Image (tube, helix red, strand yellow):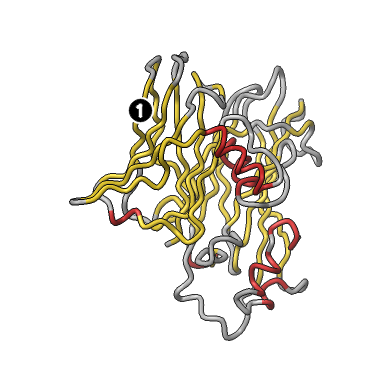
Amino acid sequence: MSSLLNLVSRFEKFGLQEIVRPENAKWRPVGIKHSGTVATAETFTQKIESTKLIHAIMISIGESTTATGAAEQGTLADDLTSLALEAPSGEIKHMTADMNKALAIATGQGKALSTGFYLITFSDPRIPEAMPLPGWLFKPLNLVMVDNAPAGSNYHHVIISVLESFVPQGIDISKWKVLYERYFTDESYGTATGEKPYDHEVTRNVYGYLYEMDDDGTLDNDIFNKLKIVGEKPGAEHVPVDNQWISHIREENAMQAGVALPTGFFYVAWPKGYDTGQYKSLKSIVNIPTAGTDAGLRVLERYAK
Protein backbone atom coordinates (compact mmCIF):
# COMPACT_ATOMS: atom_id res chain seq x y z
CA MET A 1 0.00 0.00 0.00
CA SER A 2 2.54 2.58 1.09
CA SER A 3 4.85 1.55 -1.75
CA LEU A 4 2.07 2.11 -4.28
CA LEU A 5 1.32 5.66 -3.18
CA ASN A 6 4.71 6.66 -1.72
CA LEU A 7 2.88 7.43 1.51
CA VAL A 8 5.52 6.44 4.06
CA SER A 9 8.32 8.65 2.76
CA ARG A 10 5.79 11.38 1.96
CA PHE A 11 4.50 11.74 5.50
CA GLU A 12 7.64 10.87 7.44
CA LYS A 13 9.15 13.95 5.79
CA PHE A 14 6.55 16.07 7.57
CA GLY A 15 6.70 14.23 10.89
CA LEU A 16 3.36 12.52 10.28
CA GLN A 17 4.42 8.90 10.59
CA GLU A 18 1.27 8.13 12.59
CA ILE A 19 -0.87 8.68 9.50
CA VAL A 20 0.56 5.62 7.76
CA ARG A 21 0.91 3.18 10.67
CA PRO A 22 -0.66 -0.17 9.63
CA GLU A 23 -3.51 0.20 12.10
CA ASN A 24 -4.30 3.73 10.86
CA ALA A 25 -4.20 3.58 7.05
CA LYS A 26 -6.34 1.06 5.19
CA TRP A 27 -8.46 0.52 2.09
CA ARG A 28 -12.26 0.55 2.47
CA PRO A 29 -14.81 -0.48 -0.19
CA VAL A 30 -17.44 2.23 -0.71
CA GLY A 31 -19.62 1.07 -3.57
CA ILE A 32 -20.42 -1.05 -6.62
CA LYS A 33 -22.25 0.31 -9.65
CA HIS A 34 -23.88 -1.67 -12.48
CA SER A 35 -25.11 -0.61 -15.90
CA GLY A 36 -28.85 0.01 -15.92
CA THR A 37 -29.21 -0.83 -19.60
CA VAL A 38 -27.35 -3.33 -21.74
CA ALA A 39 -24.70 -2.02 -24.18
CA THR A 40 -25.37 1.62 -23.26
CA ALA A 41 -23.02 4.42 -22.20
CA GLU A 42 -23.93 5.77 -18.76
CA THR A 43 -22.90 8.11 -15.96
CA PHE A 44 -22.31 6.56 -12.54
CA THR A 45 -22.30 8.67 -9.37
CA GLN A 46 -20.90 7.33 -6.11
CA LYS A 47 -21.30 9.32 -2.90
CA ILE A 48 -18.17 9.06 -0.75
CA GLU A 49 -18.70 9.67 2.94
CA SER A 50 -15.70 9.68 5.26
CA THR A 51 -14.81 10.86 8.75
CA LYS A 52 -11.13 10.30 8.04
CA LEU A 53 -8.32 11.58 5.83
CA ILE A 54 -8.70 10.34 2.25
CA HIS A 55 -5.41 9.54 0.52
CA ALA A 56 -6.69 7.95 -2.67
CA ILE A 57 -9.69 6.53 -4.50
CA MET A 58 -9.31 3.31 -6.52
CA ILE A 59 -11.75 2.46 -9.31
CA SER A 60 -12.00 -0.67 -11.44
CA ILE A 61 -14.38 -1.47 -14.28
CA GLY A 62 -15.23 -4.64 -16.16
CA GLU A 63 -18.01 -5.97 -18.35
CA SER A 64 -20.04 -9.17 -18.51
CA THR A 65 -23.44 -10.44 -19.57
CA THR A 66 -24.62 -10.39 -15.94
CA ALA A 67 -26.81 -7.37 -15.16
CA THR A 68 -26.39 -7.01 -11.37
CA GLY A 69 -25.17 -8.83 -8.33
CA ALA A 70 -22.09 -10.35 -9.88
CA ALA A 71 -19.31 -11.01 -7.35
CA GLU A 72 -16.74 -10.47 -10.06
CA GLN A 73 -16.49 -7.70 -12.64
CA GLY A 74 -16.19 -9.93 -15.68
CA THR A 75 -13.51 -8.83 -18.14
CA LEU A 76 -11.59 -5.78 -16.95
CA ALA A 77 -11.36 -3.04 -19.60
CA ASP A 78 -10.32 0.61 -19.85
CA ASP A 79 -13.92 1.61 -20.47
CA LEU A 80 -14.24 4.85 -18.50
CA THR A 81 -14.09 8.09 -20.50
CA SER A 82 -14.06 10.73 -17.74
CA LEU A 83 -13.70 11.15 -13.99
CA ALA A 84 -14.74 14.00 -11.70
CA LEU A 85 -14.79 14.48 -7.95
CA GLU A 86 -17.34 17.08 -6.90
CA ALA A 87 -17.68 18.89 -3.55
CA PRO A 88 -20.15 21.63 -2.56
CA SER A 89 -17.43 24.20 -3.26
CA GLY A 90 -16.91 22.87 -6.81
CA GLU A 91 -14.86 20.26 -8.66
CA ILE A 92 -11.70 19.00 -7.00
CA LYS A 93 -10.83 16.64 -9.86
CA HIS A 94 -11.97 16.75 -13.49
CA MET A 95 -10.09 14.74 -16.08
CA THR A 96 -10.49 12.35 -18.94
CA ALA A 97 -9.96 8.72 -18.00
CA ASP A 98 -6.93 8.65 -20.29
CA MET A 99 -5.49 11.60 -18.34
CA ASN A 100 -5.87 9.58 -15.16
CA LYS A 101 -3.83 6.74 -16.64
CA ALA A 102 -1.11 9.12 -17.82
CA LEU A 103 -1.04 11.01 -14.52
CA ALA A 104 -0.24 7.84 -12.58
CA ILE A 105 2.97 7.55 -14.61
CA ALA A 106 3.86 11.26 -14.77
CA THR A 107 3.60 11.68 -11.00
CA GLY A 108 6.00 8.86 -10.27
CA GLN A 109 3.84 5.99 -9.02
CA GLY A 110 6.43 3.71 -10.62
CA LYS A 111 4.26 1.77 -13.07
CA ALA A 112 1.32 2.03 -15.42
CA LEU A 113 -2.10 1.24 -14.00
CA SER A 114 -3.38 -2.18 -15.00
CA THR A 115 -6.20 -2.55 -17.53
CA GLY A 116 -9.53 -1.55 -16.00
CA PHE A 117 -8.03 0.37 -13.05
CA TYR A 118 -8.01 4.11 -12.28
CA LEU A 119 -6.49 5.92 -9.29
CA ILE A 120 -7.29 9.38 -7.92
CA THR A 121 -4.71 10.65 -5.42
CA PHE A 122 -4.51 13.66 -3.11
CA SER A 123 -0.82 13.54 -2.20
CA ASP A 124 2.25 13.83 -4.38
CA PRO A 125 5.80 13.39 -3.01
CA ARG A 126 6.91 16.29 -5.21
CA ILE A 127 4.20 18.73 -4.07
CA PRO A 128 4.81 19.58 -0.38
CA GLU A 129 1.55 21.53 -0.06
CA ALA A 130 -0.68 18.65 -1.17
CA MET A 131 -2.08 16.77 1.82
CA PRO A 132 -4.77 14.10 2.30
CA LEU A 133 -8.36 15.24 1.89
CA PRO A 134 -10.29 15.70 5.18
CA GLY A 135 -13.39 13.79 4.11
CA TRP A 136 -15.72 15.29 6.73
CA LEU A 137 -15.03 18.84 5.48
CA PHE A 138 -15.99 18.07 1.86
CA LYS A 139 -19.42 16.51 2.04
CA PRO A 140 -21.38 15.62 0.11
CA LEU A 141 -18.46 14.32 -1.96
CA ASN A 142 -19.51 12.73 -5.25
CA LEU A 143 -17.38 10.68 -7.61
CA VAL A 144 -18.81 10.99 -11.13
CA MET A 145 -17.70 8.42 -13.72
CA VAL A 146 -18.72 8.27 -17.38
CA ASP A 147 -18.26 5.06 -19.39
CA ASN A 148 -18.48 4.14 -23.03
CA ALA A 149 -21.01 1.58 -24.22
CA PRO A 150 -20.02 -1.99 -23.29
CA ALA A 151 -19.89 -4.43 -26.15
CA GLY A 152 -22.76 -6.52 -27.47
CA SER A 153 -25.09 -7.75 -24.74
CA ASN A 154 -22.77 -6.72 -21.90
CA TYR A 155 -23.19 -4.64 -18.75
CA HIS A 156 -20.52 -2.63 -16.95
CA HIS A 157 -19.63 -3.24 -13.30
CA VAL A 158 -17.69 -0.55 -11.39
CA ILE A 159 -16.07 -1.07 -7.98
CA ILE A 160 -14.84 1.86 -5.86
CA SER A 161 -12.68 1.87 -2.73
CA VAL A 162 -10.87 4.55 -0.72
CA LEU A 163 -7.58 4.63 1.16
CA GLU A 164 -8.12 6.39 4.49
CA SER A 165 -6.36 7.09 7.76
CA PHE A 166 -7.31 8.53 11.14
CA VAL A 167 -6.20 12.03 12.06
CA PRO A 168 -3.44 11.65 14.67
CA GLN A 169 -3.92 13.59 17.88
CA GLY A 170 -2.17 16.94 17.96
CA ILE A 171 -2.09 17.41 14.17
CA ASP A 172 -3.42 20.77 12.99
CA ILE A 173 -5.05 20.44 9.58
CA SER A 174 -6.51 23.94 9.44
CA LYS A 175 -3.89 25.13 6.95
CA TRP A 176 -3.71 22.00 4.84
CA LYS A 177 -4.22 22.45 1.11
CA VAL A 178 -6.01 20.15 -1.33
CA LEU A 179 -4.52 19.01 -4.63
CA TYR A 180 -6.82 20.05 -7.48
CA GLU A 181 -6.39 18.40 -10.90
CA ARG A 182 -8.67 19.79 -13.60
CA TYR A 183 -8.81 20.74 -17.24
CA PHE A 184 -10.88 23.76 -18.19
CA THR A 185 -10.85 23.88 -21.99
CA ASP A 186 -11.31 21.34 -24.78
CA GLU A 187 -9.66 23.05 -27.75
CA SER A 188 -10.08 22.01 -31.38
CA TYR A 189 -8.03 23.48 -34.24
CA GLY A 190 -9.57 21.65 -37.18
CA THR A 191 -7.30 21.12 -40.18
CA ALA A 192 -5.16 24.19 -39.47
CA THR A 193 -1.36 24.16 -39.43
CA GLY A 194 1.16 26.40 -37.67
CA GLU A 195 1.13 27.82 -34.13
CA LYS A 196 -2.12 27.67 -32.16
CA PRO A 197 -2.84 29.04 -28.66
CA TYR A 198 -4.35 27.33 -25.63
CA ASP A 199 -5.44 29.69 -22.81
CA HIS A 200 -4.64 28.82 -19.18
CA GLU A 201 -6.13 29.95 -15.89
CA VAL A 202 -4.04 32.76 -14.33
CA THR A 203 -4.94 32.68 -10.64
CA ARG A 204 -3.05 29.65 -9.38
CA ASN A 205 0.31 28.36 -8.19
CA VAL A 206 0.59 25.52 -10.71
CA TYR A 207 2.76 22.44 -10.16
CA GLY A 208 2.30 20.83 -13.53
CA TYR A 209 0.51 20.74 -16.86
CA LEU A 210 -0.48 17.37 -18.34
CA TYR A 211 -1.12 17.74 -22.09
CA GLU A 212 -3.52 15.43 -23.96
CA MET A 213 -3.16 15.58 -27.77
CA ASP A 214 -5.56 14.02 -30.25
CA ASP A 215 -6.54 14.07 -33.89
CA ASP A 216 -10.30 13.73 -34.34
CA GLY A 217 -10.58 12.05 -30.93
CA THR A 218 -7.70 9.58 -31.42
CA LEU A 219 -4.71 10.17 -29.14
CA ASP A 220 -1.70 11.16 -31.23
CA ASN A 221 1.97 11.87 -30.43
CA ASP A 222 2.67 13.77 -33.64
CA ILE A 223 -0.29 16.08 -34.27
CA PHE A 224 1.74 18.81 -32.49
CA ASN A 225 5.54 18.91 -32.63
CA LYS A 226 6.60 21.94 -30.54
CA LEU A 227 5.50 23.71 -27.37
CA LYS A 228 5.96 27.31 -26.25
CA ILE A 229 4.53 28.73 -23.02
CA VAL A 230 4.14 32.52 -22.91
CA GLY A 231 3.09 34.59 -19.91
CA GLU A 232 2.34 38.28 -20.41
CA LYS A 233 1.83 41.11 -17.95
CA PRO A 234 2.25 44.89 -18.23
CA GLY A 235 5.86 45.58 -19.09
CA ALA A 236 7.06 41.99 -19.24
CA GLU A 237 6.84 38.72 -21.13
CA HIS A 238 8.07 35.39 -19.79
CA VAL A 239 8.72 32.29 -21.91
CA PRO A 240 9.43 29.39 -19.52
CA VAL A 241 9.23 26.88 -22.40
CA ASP A 242 10.53 28.16 -25.73
CA ASN A 243 9.65 26.08 -28.81
CA GLN A 244 10.77 22.82 -27.24
CA TRP A 245 10.28 19.62 -29.21
CA ILE A 246 7.41 17.65 -27.70
CA SER A 247 9.20 14.39 -28.52
CA HIS A 248 12.06 15.57 -26.27
CA ILE A 249 9.66 16.43 -23.44
CA ARG A 250 8.12 12.96 -23.73
CA GLU A 251 11.57 11.40 -23.55
CA GLU A 252 12.39 13.42 -20.44
CA ASN A 253 9.10 12.26 -18.93
CA ALA A 254 10.03 8.63 -19.64
CA MET A 255 13.48 9.07 -18.08
CA GLN A 256 12.01 10.52 -14.89
CA ALA A 257 9.09 8.09 -14.58
CA GLY A 258 10.93 4.96 -15.70
CA VAL A 259 8.19 4.20 -18.25
CA ALA A 260 6.88 6.14 -21.25
CA LEU A 261 3.67 8.11 -20.94
CA PRO A 262 0.76 6.76 -23.01
CA THR A 263 0.35 7.87 -26.61
CA GLY A 264 -0.83 11.48 -26.86
CA PHE A 265 0.51 12.71 -23.51
CA PHE A 266 3.38 14.78 -22.16
CA TYR A 267 3.96 16.53 -18.83
CA VAL A 268 5.59 19.84 -17.88
CA ALA A 269 6.32 20.13 -14.15
CA TRP A 270 7.21 22.97 -11.80
CA PRO A 271 8.22 21.22 -8.54
CA LYS A 272 8.33 24.49 -6.57
CA GLY A 273 5.19 25.86 -8.20
CA TYR A 274 4.66 28.38 -10.99
CA ASP A 275 2.85 31.58 -9.98
CA THR A 276 0.41 32.06 -12.85
CA GLY A 277 -1.41 34.77 -10.92
CA GLN A 278 1.28 37.27 -11.89
CA TYR A 279 0.08 37.31 -15.53
CA LYS A 280 -2.75 38.94 -17.39
CA SER A 281 -2.44 36.22 -20.04
CA LEU A 282 -0.83 32.78 -20.05
CA LYS A 283 -0.88 30.56 -23.11
CA SER A 284 0.54 27.30 -24.32
CA ILE A 285 1.32 27.67 -28.01
CA VAL A 286 1.52 24.38 -29.89
CA ASN A 287 2.70 23.95 -33.46
CA ILE A 288 0.83 21.78 -35.96
CA PRO A 289 3.39 20.67 -38.59
CA THR A 290 0.97 18.80 -40.86
CA ALA A 291 -2.79 19.16 -41.14
CA GLY A 292 -4.78 16.47 -39.37
CA THR A 293 -8.50 15.76 -39.42
CA ASP A 294 -9.25 17.83 -36.31
CA ALA A 295 -6.29 18.62 -34.02
CA GLY A 296 -7.38 18.70 -30.38
CA LEU A 297 -5.76 19.68 -27.09
CA ARG A 298 -6.69 19.50 -23.40
CA VAL A 299 -4.38 20.52 -20.54
CA LEU A 300 -4.85 19.24 -16.99
CA GLU A 301 -3.74 21.87 -14.46
CA ARG A 302 -2.44 20.70 -11.08
CA TYR A 303 -2.54 23.16 -8.18
CA ALA A 304 -3.05 23.20 -4.42
CA LYS A 305 -5.40 25.48 -2.53
Specify whether 6 is left or right of 86.
right
* Residue at figure coordinates x 52%, y 33% from the top left: 246
Above or below: residue 127 compared with residue 224: below
Q: Nearer the viewer, residue 32 or 144?
A: 144
Specify whether 188 is left or right of 139.
left
Specify few, some or many for label 1: CA neighbours under 10 Å numbering under 14, 14-19, or 20 or more: some
Above or below: residue 50 compared with residue 21: above
Q: Nearer the viewer, residue 67 or 294?
A: 294
Specify whether 93 is left or right of 66.
left
Residue placed furthest toward the left: 234
Which quarter of the image is occupied by the N terminus?
bottom right
Residue 42: % across, % down: 56, 31
* Residue at figure coordinates x 26%, y 46% from the top left: 232
* Residue at figure coordinates x 57%, y 58% from the top left: 122
Above or below: residue 294 compared with residue 137: above
Q: Toward which corner of the image does residue 4 lie, by quadrant?
A: bottom right
Q: Toward which corner of the image does residue 20 lie, by quadrant?
A: bottom right
What residue type is disc 1 on?
Lys
Residue 26: % across, % down: 73, 64
Residue 194: % across, % down: 37, 22
* Residue at figure coordinates x 51%, y 80% from the top left: 172
- Residue position marked by numbered label 1 in the rendering: 196
Secondary structure type for disc 1: strand
